[in-house]
Amino acid sequence: MTDTDTERNESSAGGGDTPAAALERIVDPVVAVAGGTVTCVNAAAADAFDTHTDVSDRPAASVLDTVWEQLEAEIEETAIGTVRTVSLEDDRFDARIHRGDDGATITFDHDDTSHVRDRAIKDRAIDEAPIGVTLSDPSREDNPLIYVNDAYERLTGYTSEEVVGQNCRFLQGEDSDPEAIREMREAIDEQRPVTVELKNYRKDGEEFWNEVTIAPVRDDDGEVTNYVGFQNDVTARKQAQFELERHKEKLQEERAELERVLERVEGLVQDVTAAVAGATSRTDLEDAVCDRIAAERAYEGVWIGERSPATSSIEARTSAGTTPEPIEIDDGHPASVALERGGVAVDRVDGTTVAAIPLAYSGVEYGVLTVRTTEGHDVDERDEVILSALTRAVASGINARETSRMLATDAVVAVELELVDRNVAPVALSAAADCELEYRRSVHRTDDETASLYTATDASMDELEAAAAELEGVELRPIVERDEECLVELTTDESLVEWLSERGAVVRSITAEDGRTRLTLEVPRSANVRDVVEAVEERYPETDVRSFQQRERADETRQEFAANLEDELTDRQLAALQRAYLGGYFEWPRPTTGEELAQSMGVSRPTFHEHLRTAEAKLCRAFFGE
């Protein structure tokens, strides 16, 4: 409790009450004594002890008779400023002794059994309450405490003798909230209840959070006679509250950091994607990517390198912010480890964190991207995810540039392979149907599926369909059956032609017979031909390399003419033209009808003829136009 400027004259020598008396004022016999002499009695006491009210200076023993001897001893045992309840040998009364500086006031309670029991229960309830209970006397200077219960003693570590007579502010300290203290002071000045939470200090100096409630106690006339206080230790709750607030602040900081990271990542990904899409060559692409990543504050150097078979090392193709020396393939550097493992590798190199990620697309290796971080920045899981996503985009872009260069280059290596793996559809079908298959072309359907057209000899369409039905992962669609051969469409889970194209190789021919397939590829001389061949050997065991042959392409090969024409044709127009030609539609007599070809495409006959006529017109323009 705090100071109050309100002062009141004490109405008795004692100046204080028990908790029950403060809460419930009862008119009982009252006798004031000082030094063994009666100084005052009220009318109720005069009636009770059969004396007149003017008994000043009379010995207490002559007024109180036999009970004085017991009361005198109890008064001596009562501390000044406190209250003591006494069970008298006189059956009529119990007594409460109010000890003051100059004497004592004795209040006699009639021995009404129910009243005594109720008061005893109230006193015991207050004494044994689980929270601290205090009473103060605002009529005395500085509003001191006149009562504390056991829970208060346990809460604060102070005994009743140590705190009675003091204002309760002694529990406050340097970290007690001034605003809460001011709020209590104002409530006492305005004689109204108040509840605050503030930091207090136990006797041993330990801090605790105290929920303090202070309320005025009024008499029958509405005058404030005391203040009752309740103290509750809410330290655990406050700590949980502070922890929750810290957690919220941490989440807010993490959310803000995440938003900054996402903004940075979004910008980085967009810029790298733009570099990949806008570069006209592999070199331009790699230069732009290194420059953009090196512009990030987290990285001080970026480079892209590739294996050099001649030196057995990894050599830089391009770099930004650093000039790396060649790295031995087996020296444990993150770049070499990343290529060996096929995944992200992070390590400390010369006191700086270095991360390396392979550049690979569809199993084809295009090198390794290596970043050196700035001082104090480590590569965490989030960085690894970002860099891995970037390298996938870069590798895809390099693959597209290399494939375009391969199609445009005149210097190629022709590779002839022999495959016996039954996972290759023509190998499996030629063995199952005892026939010969010759690859014609591949068709990209509108559902993004690739199908390959083959002509088959030495087997009927029924035999081919029956054999394909027994093969897992192979779907055969009949196109047309002629006297000497059948035209069929093969669809597999993954097209061999498309898989090789993604690795920079162009399929020139596929011939299958007796469970063996001859495959002829063209790979640019500038590409890593060995990587392509090794990829085929790894995917299809027992692959046999028949020949390597370097050659120059003619000014415009038949394949290039066809490729240029394909650029002019839609997928449907190309499919109609291919099926018409390979199905013998242009021969006479026709071995197949337009209706049959339309059914093989899943369209109506008029639609088929519309696609075919449009394709024929474009073909004529390719031959006869300028």
Image: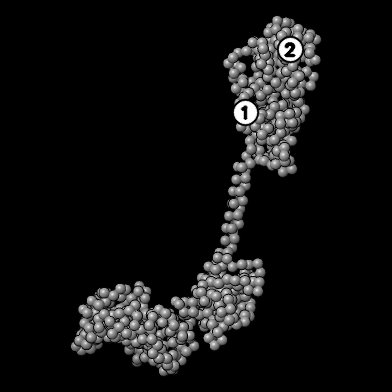
Q: Amino acid at mark 1?
A: Glu
Depth check: give the residue in front, 601 or 499: 499
Disc 1 vs disc 2: Cβ atoms closer than 8 Å? no
How is the rendered protein coloured?
one colour
**Horizontal arrangement in the rendering, residue 74 relative to residue 338 (left or right):** right
Q: Is residue 479 visible?
A: no
Q: Position of residue 59 (x, y in %)?
A: 78, 9
Q: Is residue 432 visible?
A: yes
Q: Position of residue 450 (x, y in %)?
A: 35, 77
- Residue behind mark 1: 128
Q: Earlier in the sequence, mark 1 or mark 2?
A: 2
Rounded to the nearest whole Å, what is the CA distance between mark 1 and mark 2?
31 Å
Quarter occupied by the N terminus: top right
* Quadrant of the image occupied by residue 566: bottom left
Q: Is residue 513 placed above or below 164 in the rendered structure?
A: below
Q: Position of residue 490 (x, y in %)?
A: 30, 78
- Report helix, strand or loop for mark 2: helix
Q: Which mark is residue 358?
A: none
Residue at (73%, 18%) from the top-left corner?
74
* Quadrant of the image occupied by residue 355: bottom right
Q: Which mark is residue 69?
A: 2
Q: Is residue 529 placed above or below 118 in the rendered structure?
A: below
* Quadrant of the image occupied by residue 290: bottom right
Q: Position of residue 89 (x, y in %)?
A: 67, 12
Quarter occupied by the C terminus: bottom left
**Horizontal arrangement in the rendering, residue 455 relative to residue 526 (left or right):** left
